[in-house]
Amino acid sequence: MHAVPRRGFLFAGAAAMVTRLAGQQTASRESLVEDVVTANHILAAQEIVDAFGHVSVRTAPGAGRYLISRSIAPAQVTAADIMELDLDSKPIAGEKRTSYRERFIHGEIYRVRPDVMSIVHCHAPALIPFSITRIPLRPVYHNSSFVGEGVPVFEIREAGGDTDLLVSTPDLGRALAKALGNKPAVLMRGHGAVIVGKSIIESVARSVYLEVNARVQAQAMAMGARITYLDEGEVKKRAEDPDPYGRAWDLWKRQALLSNR
């Protein structure tokens, strides 16, 4: 498993964030496809996903379509694997390939969360203990301050009784979206997590740092001493940073490109 990053990321400035958001608003399909491929490779390299897991991006703000890979391991995703689905998670006309069984996670969240531009689903092992106990994830690390907004747990039995734990129907997707609510992430009991963001950079970085937070919190709890969590004021201050993860994305993207040569 990757190590906790040794340095925080410096304030990037409002201008940098404006540039990134402007690019998101006007992004071409080609650049969005590149971002989805890159995101898959980053998540695999950071050990947030393995053979399973997926990431998507909405085609445009408010759009009723999103891009996601066909059913393939994230590390193997190429531009040719990217598909376009509607909010019913059905491929656009003419597409014959099959995407992931749990694609309904994406369509149903996009349907009720117009603020969300990207979604990650992962099975990072460090998150599982917090999905099967009554111990909540709480923010312990500045790059995971978003945890302070709340990370609920989705209990699939309340929506579908005994299942295979996969969100493989629209009804289960809607139930998961309801459990997520307006939060940045939701844990899935005995399964994994779903993380959302207003950009693909944010959803990917939140996925990485959610896993870091879980590991660090568990390590701190094992020490048996009182834990000092980030407080509400600190969480709010961290949220004021307009581009907290741009530097991380740039680094991870470069590392992914180098590793795929």
Image: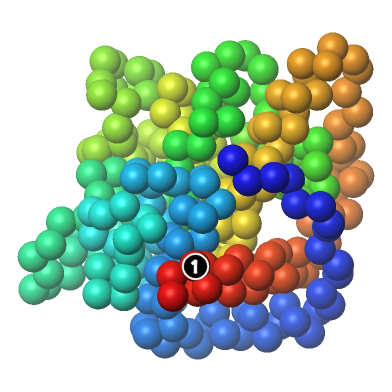
- Relative placement, left or right, of 248 versus 39 is right
Q: Quadrant of the C terminus?
A: bottom left
Residue 115, image x, y percentages: 55, 61
- Relative placement, left or right, of 32 versus 93 is right
Residue 43, image x, y percentages: 50, 55
Q: Quadrant of the N terminus?
A: top right
Residue 162, image x, y percentages: 26, 15
- Relative placement, left or right, of 73 versus 214 is left
Disc 1 marks a residue whose amino acid type is: Ser
Q: Quadrant of residue 231?
A: top right
Count of marks overlaid on the render: 1
Residue 99, image x, y percentages: 22, 55
User: Disc 1 designates what residue?
Assistant: 259
Q: Nearer the viewer, residue 210 or 156?
A: 210
Vertical arrangement, residue 188 with respect to residue 99, above or below: above
Vertical arrangement, residue 169 with respect to residue 62, above or below: above
Question: What residue sits 61% from the left and 85% below the top?
Answer: 22
Question: What residue sits 45% from the left and 37% below the top?
Answer: 123
